[in-house]
């Protein structure tokens, strides 16, 4: 599922969710008391700033289609079985302006991005 891939929560919605916070109420530990789990967060604004100039130039103005059913290229069984109806793709700029900070943020992921509009599947 999407949790197995790097992703932005709800990027498949026409209006993606806002900031994400995680708060562990009960965190499992292994036999020596080390906390288990591997949720990570990234600064997508910094990632956009640190893109190589040539790549940034290629990405500027491009948009990607996001869809929950895509699931990193392996459709979720709820969709393939017909249990859930697939929603239309949401289209977002790859370099998306953060509505809170006003800065550009890198907004793509292997979990939900089906393709980049205007590029071939391989280029996407």
Image: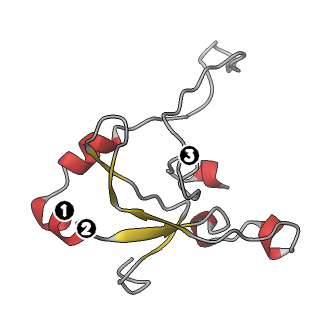
Front-most of 25 and 102?
102
| Residue 71 percent across, percent down from the top left | 63, 64
| Residue 9's disc number | 3
Cβ–Cβ under 8 Å for marks 1 and 2: yes
First along the sequence among labels 2 and 3: 3
Quarter where residue 93 is shown: bottom left
Up the image or down, 86 lies above or below 16; here it is: below
| Residue 32 percent across, percent down from the top left | 64, 14
Would residue 76 appear left or right of 53 to someone viewing this image? right
Front-most of 5 and 60?
60
| Residue 83 percent across, percent down from the top left | 88, 68
Front-most of 9 and 16?
16
Would residue 52 appear left or right of 94 to someone viewing this image? left
Q: Please tell me which residue is depicted at 25% across the width and 50% down the height of the picture.
A: 48
Q: Please tell me which residue is depicted at 57% across the width and 66% down the height of the picture.
A: 72
Would residue 33 appear left or right of 98 to someone viewing this image? right
Cβ–Cβ under 8 Å for marks 1 and 3: no
Up the image or down, 27 lies above or below 56; here it is: above
Report the residue marked by disc 2: 59
Q: CA distance from mark 1 to mark 3?
A: 23 Å
Q: CA distance from mark 1 to mark 2?
A: 5 Å
Structural crowding at the residue carrying mark 1, measured as other residues with C-alpha within 10 Å and reported as few (<14), some (14–19) or many (≥20): some
Q: Please tell me which residue is depicted at 56% across the width and 46% down the height of the picture.
A: 9
Report the residue marked by disc 1: 56
Q: Secondary structure at mark 3?
A: loop
Would residue 37 appear left or right of 78 to someone viewing this image? left
First along the sequence among labels 1 and 3: 3
């Amino acid at each position: 599922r999407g949790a197995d891939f790097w992703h932005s929560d709800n990027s498949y919605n026409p209006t993606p969710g806002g900031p994400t916070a995680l708060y562990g109420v009960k965190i499992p530990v292994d036999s020596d008391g080390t906390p288990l789990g591997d949720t990570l967060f990234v600064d997508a604004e910094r990632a956009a700033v640190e893109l190589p100039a040539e790549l940034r130039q290629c990405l500027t103005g491009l948009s990607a289609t996001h869809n929950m059913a895509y699931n990193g290229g392996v459709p979720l069984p709820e969709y393939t079985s017909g249990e859930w109806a697939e929603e239309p793709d949401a289209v977002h700029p790859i370099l998306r302006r953060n509505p809170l900070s006003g800065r550009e943020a890198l907004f793509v992921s292997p979990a939900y991005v089906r393709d980049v509009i205007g590029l071939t599947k391989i280029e996407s």
